Amino acid sequence: MHRNDGFRELDRRECLDLLTQVPLGRIVYTENALPAVLPVNFFLDHDQAVVLRTSGASRMARAVDASVVAFEVDRFDETTRSGWSVVVTGRASLVTDPGEAERLGRSGPLSWAPVEDGVHVRIEPELVTGRLLEDVSPAGTV
Amino acid sequence: MHRNDGFRELDRRECLDLLTQVPLGRIVYTENALPAVLPVNFFLDHDQAVVLRTSGASRMARAVDASVVAFEVDRFDETTRSGWSVVVTGRASLVTDPGEAERLGRSGPLSWAPVEDGVHVRIEPELVTGRLLEDVSPAGTV
């Protein structure tokens, strides 16, 4: 779709490769029937699930458990007006199994901010989409 | 809230100032009952509404008109693990008045990608929140 709008759609493999290049994304969910979004750092698990860590007492943790969420990562260059974005959509769940939590705790960097009573959130990569905006630099659009 | 988690909450004025520093944000909405998110460039109108431009035929334009959406902007430094994020939440509407559309068309840069049959989207800044993550650099969290 929209193949003449300057974007190229990315396939799942390209999207997953790009997700390993950026440490920060944004979890998109619903809270009190309103759209909500929060930037968080993350990593990909061996099965390509998005894993992040937050306070178990946070509003986000309560809102996303057992819900379908989106997770967005992008990188754009303001000078060339080009870049890419990837969105993972799938069910989020708090990791309650102690062994699994311990394994994830060893797997990578998990929070830039200090987290007390932390909990891991896993997002299943059910739908992975992305698009690339190439450097079109159309004259006169500024 | 969470005043000991490394974040400082920003007031509305601080948030609006930060929004003028970055040309790209992410509109967060609901499509087919699922959370959706799309990076877009934008500017602030004189009344602090978020203004962006997209194809009138796009799925996003159809999904957000007359709905409450969130618009997120952030800037983080991966090295110092510090930065800020701002979220504007409010009702979105497609601009249908020709005079208003013409005025907005003169007001600023509106799309990095070529847009045919473009339409302006305005997001009312009903709720503006933000937070600053200061450079805490805790040893040993990587």
Image (tube, coloured by chain):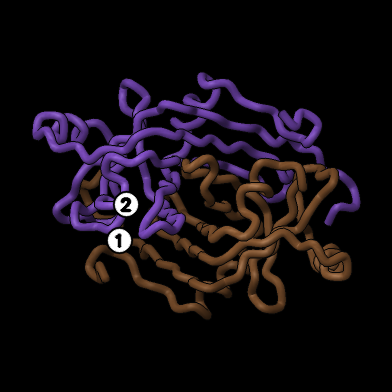
Chain colours: A brown, B purple
Q: Secondary structure at mark 2?
A: loop
x and y percentages locating residue B45 in the rendered image: 31, 27
Q: Nearer the viewer, residue A16 or A104?
A: A104
Q: Quadrant of the N terminus of chain A?
A: bottom left
**How far is mark 2 from mark 1, CA to CA?**
8 Å
Residue kind at label 2, given as amino acid type: Trp
Residue kind at label 1, given as amino acid type: Val
Q: Nearer the viewer, residue A90 or B96?
A: A90
Looking at the image, residue A115 sits to the left or right of residue B29; the answer is right
Above or below: residue A32 compared with residue A66: above
Above or below: residue B54 compared with residue A47: above
Q: Residue drawn 44% across and 41% down?
A: B70
Q: Quadrant of the C terminus of chain A?
A: top left
Above or below: residue B54 compared with residue B52: below
The residue indicated by pointer 1 is A136
x and y percentages locating residue B110 in the rendered image: 28, 43
Contact? badges 2 and 1 (CB < 8 Å): yes
The quadrant in which residue A96 appears is: bottom right
Q: Which chain is home to disc 1? A: A
x and y percentages locating residue B76 in the rendered image: 62, 44
Q: Nearer the viewer, mark 2 or mark 1?
A: 2
Q: Secondary structure at mark 1?
A: loop
Image disc number at residue B112? 2
Q: Residue drawn 19% across and 37% down?
A: B95
Say whether residue B67 is visible. yes
Mark 1 Cα-neighbour bin, 10 Å: few <14, some 14–19, many ≥20: some
Q: Which chain is home to disc 2? A: B
Mark 2 Cα-neighbour bin, 10 Å: few <14, some 14–19, many ≥20: many
Q: Residue drawn 21% across and 33% down?
A: B104
x and y percentages locating residue A105 in the rendered image: 84, 63
Looking at the image, residue A53 sits to the left or right of residue A75; the answer is right
